[in-house]
Amino acid sequence: MSKKLFIKTYGCQMNVYDSARMADVMAPHGYVPAATADDADIIILNTCHIREKAAEKVYSELGRMRQIKESRLDNGDDVLIAVAGCVAQAEGEEIQARAPFVDMVFGPQTYHQLPGMVARATQGERVVAMDLPVEEKFDLLPDATGAQGPTAFLTVQEGCDKFCAFCVVPYTRGAEYSRPVAQILAEAHRLVEAGAREITLLGQNVNAYRGATADGGSWGLGRLVQALAQIDGLARLRYTTSHPLDMDDDLIAAHRDVQTLMPYLHLPVQSGADRNLAAMNRRHTADDYRRIVERLRAARPDLALSSDFIVGFPGETDADFEATLQLVRDIGYAQAYSFKYSARPGTPAADATHQVPERVMSDRLGELQKLLNAQQVQFNQAMLNRTIPILLEKPGRHPGQLVGRSPWLQAVHVHAAGYGIGDIVDVQIDGVQPNSLSASLTADDRRDAAA
Ligand code: SAH
Ligand code: SF4
Ligand code: F3S
């Protein structure tokens, strides 16, 4: 009889990819996905440690999981509760000290061992597993089962060697590792055969990719993108997340030469103040970043940018914050994420003496978000009356309506009679809402029922 696996995913897209792979590894052991936690046989929380709030969410969720476990035990039944992901890697056994009903704690590099860990936990053992080399995971996981729709994620690189002073990722994900080229090409082919039209290449530091080739050489991300673009049926490629320092000539050239590579790039800068950037160990200046963006836009004039920002990094002054606003005005973003600095245990910045007061952080975040929102509105407004290709991804809320994505990742609502999910269709933008666009088919594309 099949058993049920419920996975709740927090954090970045790498966790989304990992959760799918955990489901893949359990499938041959009779586990099917559960829609809710209530009747699952295993509940896995795939967690994120990036900011304090993210990590604390896990403990409030575990409170709910405990209730589920207790009511199941009352009925003479049981459920295994597991904490995976970056909080598991960072806190390990501490999790079971705080939440003793947790049966398994395991880090991001152990997922290929999941069936064995489940077997041990079923026997009553408390499982704690961490700290294995990344290579082993990718070599030993079964082939990904394939796309769940027209868009898919594909992890090509994992881990980070950059050690930004605020960030836990180098500690939770370990050293940089790039999957071999052949493994990635094979996975991409499988995804496309299963229906993916768009693939997003993932890595904590995806443009630091340097994967081994069969002939003993190695490829960077630019070369990999060129090769993936040759796959028949693959219409769109994206990659995330990049570090400005690893934006090399090949990758910039790929933005010029590869039409499948979408003109949208998430390129986090964190701050526009050189003093902050140095203290963050980002190893580039604000002007370096401006120059990289200039080169990218010269290669691909319609490239739109997105970024991450941290306000209130220790020692940030009013003048530093003003420099960040100035950088935002200079670049002009289509979209961006911004966060208050959160001191993370074990990172160098956590011990800094000049922590910025909470109220100052809130004010700065408000001001930055006002500017970024205005830029996003402006970017979206500029789409009005333009004809753009969208990839239809899912049904909309109204009958006959579909939701697609523009090349710039905007959600676009359209009534596209005659078209289905996975089609790419030219639409004319006729409405702009805060978080989405609406559109109608162009005369050329109309495929009415009668046609
Ligand atoms: N690898 C990516 C991002 C990883 S984390 C990069 O190099 O940019 C995603 C974002 O979370 C970061 O870009 C940063 O803006 C934010 N972040 C990371 N650590 C943080 C912290 N301690 N406090 C607040 N925001 C943080
Ligand atoms: Fe964290 Fe910096 Fe690595 Fe990005 S590059 S994951 S922010 S340490
Ligand atoms: Fe969070 Fe780990 Fe991703 S800390 S952002 S889930 S790499």
Image (cartoon, grey):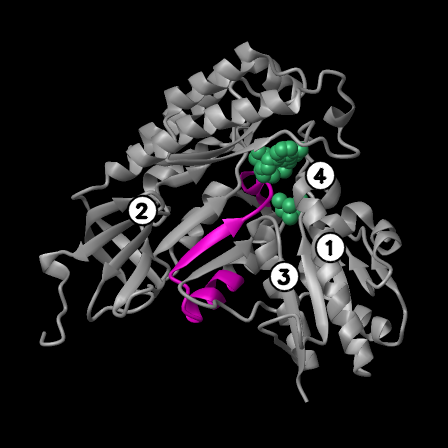
Q: Earlier in the sequence, mark 2 or mark 4?
A: 4
From the viewer's perspective, is the residue at label 2 or at label 3 nearer? Answer: 3
C-alpha span from label 3 to label 1: 18 Å
Question: In this orientation, which residue lies closer to the viewer: 22 or 439?
Answer: 439
Q: Is mark 4 within 8 Å of ligand 2?
A: yes
Q: Which residues are magenta?
A: 186-210
Q: Position of residue 36 (x, y in %)?
A: 61, 71
The tally of labels here is 4
Q: Residue furthest bottom?
A: 1
Location of mark 2 (residue): 259
Tag 2: residue type? Gln
Question: In this orientation, which residue lies closer to the viewer: 354 or 181?
Answer: 354
Question: In this orientation, which residue lies closer to the viewer: 299 or 269?
Answer: 269
Location of mark 3 (residue): 8
Location of mark 1 (residue): 109
Query: Compared with residue 226, is residue 82 higher up or lower down, i.e. above or below?
Result: below
Q: Residues within 10 Å of mark 3 (few under 14, many from 20)?
A: some
Verify whether residue 59 appears in magenta: no
C-alpha span from label 4 to label 3: 23 Å
Residue depicted at 81% across the width and 47% down the height: 91
Query: Compared with residue 216, is residue 106 higher up or lower down, i.e. above or below?
Result: below
Tag 4: residue type? Pro
Tag 4 and tag 3, C-beta contact below 8 Å: no
Q: Position of residue 396 (x, y in %)?
A: 33, 63
Numbered label attached to residue 170: 4
Q: Position of residue 71 (x, y in %)?
A: 77, 74
Q: Which secondary structure, mark 2? A: loop
C-alpha span from label 2 to label 4: 33 Å
Residue depicted at 60% across the width and 68% down the height: 143
